[in-house]
Image (cartoon, helix red, strand yellow):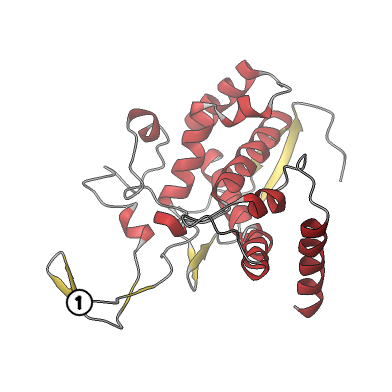
Amino acid sequence: MKQIDGLIYAEIAERQTQPDPNRDDILSLLMLAQDENGEALTPSELRDELMTLLVAGHETTATALSWALYWLYTDDRVRQNLLAELDALGTPDDPGALFKLPYLNAVCCETLRIYPVAMLTFPRIVKSPVEVMGHSLEPGMAVLGSIYLTHHQPDIYSDGDRFYPERFLERQYSSFEFLPFGGGSRRCIGMAFAQFEMKVVLSQILSQVELTLVDTPAPLKPIRRGLVSGIPPVTMVSKGRRDLSLQEN
């Protein structure tokens, strides 16, 4: 941690002494950000945000991508619908066009809904007495929101155990109904990056490789690991190529 912190703080210090207005990387954007009082982030706060992106963003996105591939290859209808959308788009030079594809977005959202990687929000500590839905909360109590239970509320998501991306085309859910990255001012800083990463990776895999499940296990259930969930072991193999540009491994 000392070595990592040393590298990060050295980079922050260099940016502060040699600012470059033409840079648009995440650190530069964070250094330009200001709070409601016009204050910039401190070096310690910048370090924390960068560590969040580096450490908290790799396993969670990989887990979400694994679930997406599992669902796509257990539901031919969904996979064919997504392939048709990708084929119609071709290979545009503008990645922004990929980010805006409605069915690809729906597939990613439904993946994050049905088995959200973060099953709970981080705890909030009650500061003053408050009543929520008939429950009296006293100062000092810790309150956690259940993302998983919210995503399976029958009055919000009918047939919530079914993988059905079309629900995100038929309705726009509020930030209190769909919250895989949490909500409010402390929503995950990596949300936009994670969503973009999912869309790029899924589009590349589906457009260039044909996969198949080695077996057809019973419907998989997530494995809980503290505040996050994972996917049980499942094996997929390539059975052909749609594009020979992939390197042989």
Q: Dot 1 lies on which element?
A: loop
Vertical position of residue 138 compared to residue 88: above or below: below
Please identify the residue farthest to the left as the structure is shown.
Answer: 134
Residue 129 location, x and y as percent?
20, 76
Residue 29 location, x and y as percent?
66, 48
Categorize mark 1 by other alpha carbons within 10 Å: few (<14), some (14-19), many (20+). Answer: few
Residue 169 location, x and y as percent?
39, 29
Would residue 214 be found to the left or right of residue 224 on screen?
right
Please identify the residue farthest to the front as the structure is shown.
Answer: 38
Residue to which mark 1 is pinned: 129
Please identify the residue farthest to the top as the structure is shown.
Answer: 88
Vertical position of residue 57 compared to residue 135: above or below: above
* Residue 18 occupies quadrant: bottom right
The residue type indicated by label 1 comes to Pro
**In the image, what residue occupies the spot 86% across and 46% down?**
249
Vertical position of residue 247 compared to residue 112: above or below: above
Residue 88 location, x and y as percent?
61, 16
**In the image, what residue occupies the spot 40% across and 51% down?**
179
Would residue 223 be found to the left or right of residue 178 on screen?
right
- Can residue 101 be seen here? The reply is yes
**In the image, what residue occupies the spot 56% across and 22% down?**
85
Return the residue nearer the eye: 241 or 25.
25
Return the residue nearer the eye: 215 or 73.
73
- Can residue 183 be seen here? The reply is no
* Residue 142 occupies quadrant: bottom left
Return the residue nearer the eye: 29 or 86.
29
